[in-house]
Amino acid sequence: MRLGRSTLLYLMFFGIVCAVPFVSSPVVTDVLIFCVLYAFVSTAWTIAVYAGPYSIGHAAYFGLGAYSTALLYTRLGISPWIGILVGIAISSSFALVISYPVFRYGIKGYYYTLTTLAVAEIMRTIFLAWDITGRAVGVWYHVVPDSLWDFQFHTSHVPYVFIGVAFLILGVFTSNAIKKARLGLAFSATRDDEDTAQSVGINTLRHKITAVVISAALTSIGGAFFAQYTLFIEPDTSMAMFVSVDILLPAVVGGVGTVSGPLIGSFLLTPLIWILRIAFGSEVLHVVIRGVVIIIVVLFAPEGIVGTLAKHSGVGGKILSIIPSRLSSRAHH
Amino acid sequence: MQLDLPIFLNLLLIGLFQGAIYSLISMGLTLIFGTMKIVNFAHGDFLMLSGYFVFWIWALFGVDPLLALPAVFLALFCIGYATERVLIKRVLGRPTHIQMLMTLGLSLIIQNSVIVLWKADPRFVHTSYADLRLELGAVAVPFPRLLSFVLAMLFALTLHLFLLKTTYGTAIRGTGQDQEAAHLMGINVNKIYSLSFGLGISCTAVAATLLSTYFPLSPFLGSSFMVITFIVIVLGGLGNYLGAFIAGLILGTIEIFTAYMLSSLLRQTIPLLIFILVLLLKPEGLFGRKLRR
């Protein structure tokens, strides 16, 4: 395969992300880790949205990934890497079990949105009440020396950047492959006009479920990464509604339904919020700003940065040719 | 765990009292949906904001919450009216996710501004009748809750009569049924939208006032009521305010019985499960007419 210009740009971008920790302070590394994490989970979220309506319950899959990994590791000493695989299995089966009836019974619009919220809330309330999940106390890690097998790095956080970037590459690759393949066309046809899609022989039910299952699997990896980085999880920080909002926000700002949108959104928003948090010294003022950002995007750029730039050719078109919206879109020409 | 008659009656009453508050909040939310086809994710935060208005009027001027009600009602009506004019209006008729993001953003702003302004610690309004209990045979009822229940019923009735009998009420219902037809009948649809939003928001003012006589107030009040309110409006049939009224009472009762018989930690889990089942089996709500899927 010949490398397209977009592929090169993505590779350059990932290269820079990996190089930054070597020339900057540990604080910047930590911000970078969150940029990568939210870019990754937001990429995962946008895969579900290729085919279907918005979910505001992705915290459920995030939490399942975090808890599977954390519980297996802290209670049974099983390596987080195996925990991640278990988390993928659990969250994707869960997504399958939930989305089959939801899509089969044709739940859409606000009914769908409220269902995704309800599912995440059911999960959160059960985890808050269940002994096995540690109730409201959550799950605490024992700190061990740096080890890849234990997925814990303390002397330097840089390995988290590398692992995060590896996950992000997996996410971007999946997102791009789906968008480009016939599957992606079927997805967007399903989203744009389900009845017409059905009438031309697209199995819309299967496509919607596939999208959610893939999205859930990737989101759970993000949850596991979060658990291994913070070394402490509880239902209110890994499954609450604000987690779902954090997951969808980068994509919304960058451009839902694009490959590069979640990346651009996360690498703009995460540092911005971090700077605001330091500038105002308040724990919550940055959440107010987050609300303002959402409203500004809704009012002035409802298709996100990438979507809006793509719409306005000219200046925007020029900028867009620098910002790849599809990985190696020219590779086949 | 034992469930003899006095305990049963006690739970039933507390459940209905709790449910009446859900009914009030949900009637406002479903009224907004019925007219404007938008689910307001910031509804709970308006409830919380009203609660703070009540608290500050009480704390600064010593005015009893119930006497402050008209002022808070009016204030929230104006805030709701203005919010519709400035923000909500711009997303009406747009895709669901755009509307959702708008009200979600609004919710983040209101809730966290309150935390910044007035801190996150819980606040209490102390009224002279806070600790009164009424003995009704074997059942002892906390007076503030009983009073709230009675007033909630009265307000629900007033709202019902307003929507049924007055010109504005008819216009609101008409706009909900068919926006174009309402427009052709000479109804100023835009004004009706602002009015409905204001009215829906001021329902939370009533709920917050009643709630403040016995319930602690915090910036998270909205989030804790929001999920159950969503369940209520879907159960009642989106847009059906009478359905929401009854569903509120039912869910309040279910919640209290769950808390007593299973665990107070699961008090929201059971209503949520009922919600999913209703969505799958009868998405038009318990009292709605058949929906076209």
Image: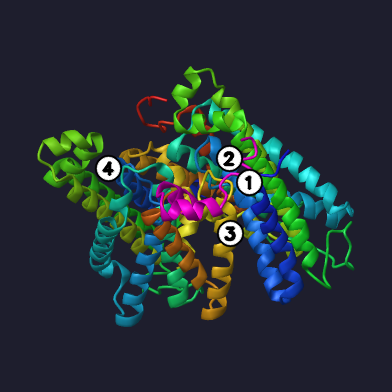
Q: Residues within 10 Å of mark 4 (few under 14, many from 20)?
A: many
Q: How is the image coloured?
A: rainbow
In the picture as drawn, the residue positioned furthest to the left comes out as: B186
- Report the mark closest to the observer, 3 or 2: 3
Instruction: Kindly identify the amino acid type of the residue bearing the numbered disc 1.
Output: Ala
- Label 3 lies in what chain? A
Disc 2 target residue: A48
- Label 3 sits on a secondary structure element that is helix
Q: Is residue B228 above or below residue A229?
A: above
> What residue does disc 1 label?
A44
Mark 3 near mark 1, Cβ–Cβ under 8 Å? Answer: no
Residue drawn at x 70%, y 63% is A16
Distance CA(mark 3)–CA(mark 4): 36 Å
Taking the magenta stretch, the answer to whether it contains residue A311 is: yes
Identify residue type, mark 4.
Answer: Thr
The residue where tag 3 is placed is: A266
